[in-house]
Image (cartoon, rainbow, N blue to C red):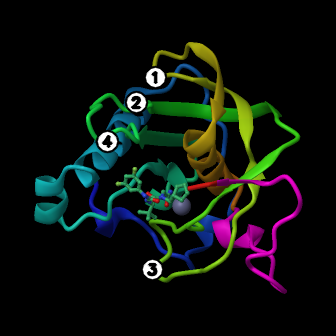
Amino acid sequence: MITMNDIIREGNPTLREVAKEVPMPPTDEEKKLGEEMLEFLKNSQDPVKAEELQLRGGVGLAAPQLDISKRLIAVHVPSSDPEDDTPVLSTVMFNPKILSHSVQDACLGEGEGCLSVDREVPGYVVRHARVTVSYYDEAGVKHKRRLKNYEAIVVQHEIDHLNGVMFYDHINEENPFALKEGVLVIE
Ligand SMILES: CC(C)(C)[C@H](NC(=O)Nc1cc(F)cc(F)c1)C(=O)N(CC(=O)NO)CC1CCCC1
Ligand SMILES: [Zn+2]
């Protein structure tokens, strides 16, 4: 199973590569990888397993973070309602692609971090507020999905990893907390 030791950290050149498309349908090995990535995220959000395995609570993971330069991500976004156990988004996406996006931008009020970055990098990471993504599932079936709010941010963060982009590449160097008019701040 995947643990923190399998996750490469900034400085590893793989994190700056453009990952390769996965031919559809995915091979058994690629399907297994996707399942393991999703299992890592679920384990990382389980207090007992996270403690046992010393995992950082993760909501998304991209194959390049495992030193595998393939266009494959997993996302497991829990509901913001603690009473609700159903995640708002829990899936493996092969060859995810942003088809269209809102004019409006958004950022997390807390800024962002990354499982591959062992330091705090303060500042707003401005992204699209809403995106329409297409992706293939492990059966090779094509899906199209509109995402908004936190799950839209997570998927954009993960797709960035497939293009060698790190969250801090988006932070304004002069003023990390500069915000243009109309940017939605997601708390
Ligand atoms: C880097 C880290 C702080 C671990 C971040 N987690 C997170 O932001 N909060 C979180 C953790 C949970 F378990 C459950 C939950 F609802 C929220 C994260 O997983 N990522 C994913 C990543 O590094 N992918 O490469 C960073 C997030 C920053 C914005 C979107 C993803
Ligand atoms: Zn990341």
Q: Earlier in the sequence, mark 2 or mark 3?
A: 2
Q: Earlier in the sequence, mark 4 or mark 1?
A: 4
Name the magenta segment's main secondary structure: loop
Q: Earlier in the sequence, mark 2 or mark 1?
A: 2
Q: Is residue 182 above or below residue 77?
A: below
Element marked by disc 3: loop
Determine contact: label 4, label 1, CB under 8 Å. no
Q: Earlier in the sequence, mark 2 or mark 4?
A: 2
Q: Nearer the viewer, mark 2 or mark 4?
A: 4
Residue furthest toward the bottom?
174
Determine contact: label 2, label 3, CB under 8 Å. no
The amino acid marked with disc number 3 is Asp
Element marked by disc 1: loop
Write the start and end of the magenta stretch as one range. 165-185
Determine contact: label 3, label 1, CB under 8 Å. no
The amino acid marked with disc number 2 is Lys
Q: CA distance from mark 2 to mark 4?
A: 9 Å
Q: Which residue is mark 3?
A: 118
Determine contact: label 2, label 1, CB under 8 Å. yes
Residue at image x 50%, y 50%? 63
Tell me the tag on residue 36: 4
Q: Earlier in the sequence, mark 4 or mark 3?
A: 4
Instruction: Mark yes or no: residue 1 visible.
Output: no
Tell me the tag on residue 31: 2
Quarter of the image for residue 107 reads bottom right
Q: CA distance from mark 4 to mark 3?
A: 22 Å
Q: Nearer the viewer, mark 2 or mark 3?
A: 3
Element marked by disc 4: helix
